[in-house]
Amino acid sequence: MSRQKPKLAVHKFSSCDGCQLALLNLGEPLLQLPTLVDIVHFAEAGPSDPTAKVDISLVEGSISTPEDVQRIQQVRENSEILVTVGACATAGGVQALANFANRNDWMSAVYTDPDQIETLQTSNAIAEYVKVDWELQGCPINSRQVIGLLRDLLSGVRPREELQPVCMECKRKGLICTLVSLGEPCMGPVTRAGCGALCPAAGRGCYGCYGPAEQVNDASLLQRFSQLGLDRQALARRFHFIVNQAPAFKAAGERLKSGSHDRNA
Amino acid sequence: MNSQDPQVVSRRPGFLTRDALEKLFIVLSQLGYQILGPVVRDGAIQFDTLSAADQLPRGVSNDQQPGHYRLEQGENQRQFDWNHGPQGLKPVCFSPREVLWAEQSNPPVFNPVPPNIEPTAVVGVRACDLAALAIQDRHFLSGSDPDPHYRQRRESLLLIGVDCARSAATCFCASTGDGPALDGGYDIGMAELDEGFLIWRESDKGRTVIDQLDLLPASDAQLETMLQSTTQASLAQQRNLPDCDELLLLYKRLEHAHWDNVAERCLSCGNCTAVCPTCFCYEASHEMSLDGETAQMVRQWDSCFSATHSSMGQYQVRPTVKQRYRQWLTHKLAGWQSQQGRIGCTGCGRCIAWCPVGIDLTAETVAVLEEGSLDV
């Protein structure tokens, strides 16, 4: 990186803007940020220069239109380091649920004049189109992740990846396992930590919004959840939810939908 | 530790009525202890700060099965009729997450961040957890560089143990020799009867408290009931572990087919290691401020089931779940015998109850030992 302050851009594609809020909600570090980087493009916060060449681009959102495809190529060309943030950018987002259906049927059902809408048949992760240097998982990501990422990139070191499941965060926080003590199905054992076990802290099961943990044993989870009254189609929907296109969750959901566990049993 | 003083006092229990248990809390407070004790919270027994005896559970027992934990409200007045919740003393001494030291870059300074500790009395500690504490003590305190944070917390404790008068279905402390009756490692001992408590001092530290309780003499019948209760709790246990010599044979079963069987069920979630009162693995990493001027070295519980635990550089020593489960079980039940002088299991059964899919350490161990042939 140059001796000048590195240039930072924040780009938005198909998304709810929630991950950009992780930056705006940084608190005191938000005031430090402009002393460390030049924020040249971050439309939600003010600066707008979408075609600027930058050192770091944070990219929120999925690719869902032909225009998105053009724009992400340009962002890639203009960025030294490209980091995708959140479930949409890393795995297509909740809107990628439509990938499992026929998009034209849906558009005809919703819009009176669907021909006006220019869209791709699927919503896809940024990495399907351009090289991605790093990913932050989560829906939405949080400020702690952003600080860790930016600090590591500014220091020129490889950012740390969270690989443990949510269960480890639960136990460190002294939270009581909803699965064991309430019999409530929880996706924590197969979901990547990082959220701080938000849902179990509120007494409900994890629904997997931080994406797949390092190990995803859907067959064992199915066996357990079946005893708790959750059938395989219902478990498939838990995998095919917020992070439905992440390879491990996508494959788990497809195995469950097709009943391949039953055949192997 | 006071609890390990040579002049260990023999059990000469006195009697405390149930109503007079409050006196114990008053005396502990007057002596300057904060009190940690069992409370019912979020459907489980948890240790939390208490100020009075009436905050203890009443008539609460537990149903613990593989992957299953439920509290049950009974009609009796007993306050220690449960066995345990997901944690014993481990988080009290070995913090789940703590700052070890703080740093600043310009000028470079390293500052210790000592834990904020006050004398703490823990009421209602079980025999299995006292045995586990002794194991953790050996790990963190032996050698020339004892862990300063662990030591500060450990030395602040006054431990008030209680006999288990019943066993959960997941308990097997009798077969590891660690319960259900108290057997050292505590300062004050208690046994609960229908009409109140037998209570005795085990260390000089405990004597200061006991001397102020105005105990009544215990009857022979009460002493007999105490012994019978723990004997019955022991006989009622449904699970057990093979003896230590047999467990060493695990080393000869490293290629046993049953490891694959367990790996098919295991989620590699690490819950067993987090609730295990003897598991001591941690990771430590830098957490830097955004401007890079300050940093903290943060230590938190790790697990041999996590990907990073066996990672050296970019190389993972144990990439598969089968390897991780095998590592955990063989280390705990065989490896610890040469490292720690005993197995690393005290029979609390938490790894069975709090495993999301109910994997049973006792059953898996027997399956690996009994089925198939030796590797070598």
Image: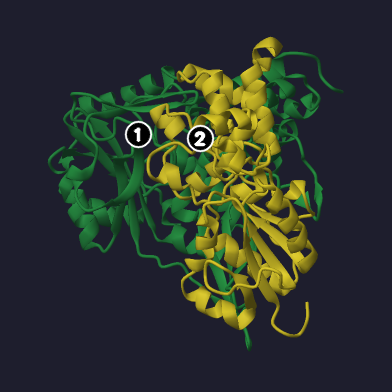
Chain colours: A yellow, B green
Residue type (three-letter) at the residue carrying disc 2: Thr
Q: In the rendering, which numbered label is found on residue A112?
A: 2
B135 horizontally vs A129: left or right? left
Q: Nearer the viewer, residue A226 or B169?
A: A226
* Comparing labels 1 and 2, the label whose residue is closer to the camera: 2
Query: Image quadrant of residue B274?
Result: top right
Compared with B97, B261 (above or below) is above
Q: Which residue is mark 1?
A: B163
**Looking at the rendering, in which quadrant would you find the N terminus of chain A?**
bottom right
Residue A152, x across and y down, in percent: 68, 68
Query: Mark 2 — on which chain does it sit?
Result: A
Query: Mark 1 — on which chain does it sit?
Result: B
Give the residue displayed 44% in from the left and 43% down from the top: A199
Q: Secondary structure at mark 2?
A: loop
Q: Secondary structure at mark 1?
A: loop
Residue type (three-letter) at the residue carrying disc 1: Asp
Give the residue displayed 77% in from the left and 68% down from the top: A78
Compared with B321, B264 (above or below) is above
Badge 1 vs badge 2, beta-carbon distance below 8 Å: no
Q: Nearer the viewer, residue A143 or B124?
A: A143
Q: Nearer the viewer, residue B38 or A205?
A: A205
